[in-house]
Image: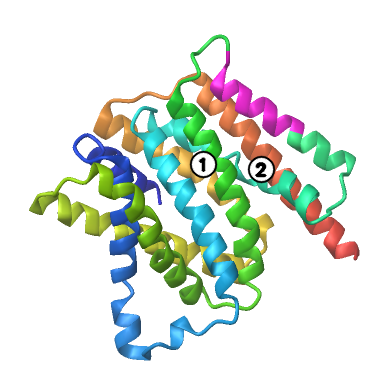
Amino acid sequence: MSAMITVVRYLSADLHPFQLAFFRAFFGFLVFTPFFIQQGLAPLRTKRLGLHGFRAILHSTSVILFFYGLTMTPLAKAISIQFSAPLFASVLAIFLLGESLRFGRIAALSVGFIGTLVVLRPGIVAIEIGTIALLVAAAMWGSAIIIIKSLARTESSTTMTIYSTLLMSPITLIFAIPVWQHPDLGQIILLLIVGALASAGHLALATAMKLAEVTALTPVEFTKLIWVAIFGFLLFGEIPDWGVWVGGALIFAATTYMSLRERQLNGKN
C-alpha cells in the first residue's frame, strides 16, 4: 500500500487526483480477470450486496479525498493522519453500534487525539485544504473498517476486494470525467501498477482480518510510516519533521492499546 501511495503521488504531478482514484479502482478490478477465468462468476456470489455498496461509497470518498490531500502533503504526514482512521472507527462504534464507553477507551482516544494535534500543530503550522481532506478521508476509512469487519464474517477476501473495486469504478468515474485528460503509455503502465498494488494490498488486508486478530494487525500498520518516509526521501527529497514521528507514534500507541484492551475484554466474555 505504501508503494501504491508513492506511485500515486508521482503521477499526481500530471494527472488529477480524481482521475487517479478512478484508474486505481478500474485497473484494480481488471487485476481479478484471472479469478473470473478460473472460477467464473463464483467470486460475485453474495447475500450482502447492499453492505458492499455502502462500503464502496465510503471507500470511494476516502480514496478521492486521500489522493486529493496527498497532492499537497508530504507522504509521511499524510500517512500519519491516516493512522487516525481506527480512532474514528472506535468513536463511530460507540455511537452507531452502542459499544460501551470505558475509561481505557476514553484514555486511548484522548492520546490518539493528542497525537493527531502533534502531527497537525494547529496555530503553529497552517491547516490547509489538503490536511482537511486527509482528515475527512481518515474518517471515511474508519467507517469502512467497521463494515469490512462485518463483511469478513461471511464473505471471502476475494469477494470483498472484487466488489470494492467493481463498485468504486462508476462512483469515482463521476468525479473523474470533469477533469479527464488522456494518459500517455508510460502513465497507463504506472496506473496499471497502482491498480495491481491497491488490489493486492486490500486483498491482503481482507485476508489478514479473516485470519488474525486486530491486535496482531494494528502494530504492522505503523510500518507504513517507515516505508513512506523512505520512499518520500528517496524520490521526493522529503524529510519528516519531529511532529510526524511523535504524533504518529502516539496515534499508533492509542490504536494498539485499544486493540489489546478489546482482546482482553472479549477473552473475559
Amino acid under label 1? Ala
* Label 2 CA crowd tier, 10 Å (few <14, some 14–19, many 20+): many
Which residue sits at x=46%, y=81%?
Answer: 44
Amino acid under label 2? Phe
Task: Compare marks 1 and 2 and give the one earlier in the sequence.
Answer: 2
C-alpha span from label 1 to label 2 = 10 Å
Q: Which residue is mark 2?
A: 88
In percent of width and height, residue 185 lies at 9, 54
* Label 1 CA crowd tier, 10 Å (few <14, some 14–19, many 20+): many
Classify 199 as above or below 40.
above
The quarter holding residue 118 reads: top right
Q: Which residues are magenta?
A: 110-122
Classify 200 as above or below 85.
below
Comparing 210 with 41, the one in front is: 41
Q: Which residue is mark 1?
A: 137
Comparing 6 with 136, the one in front is: 136
In percent of width and height, residue 98 lies at 84, 54
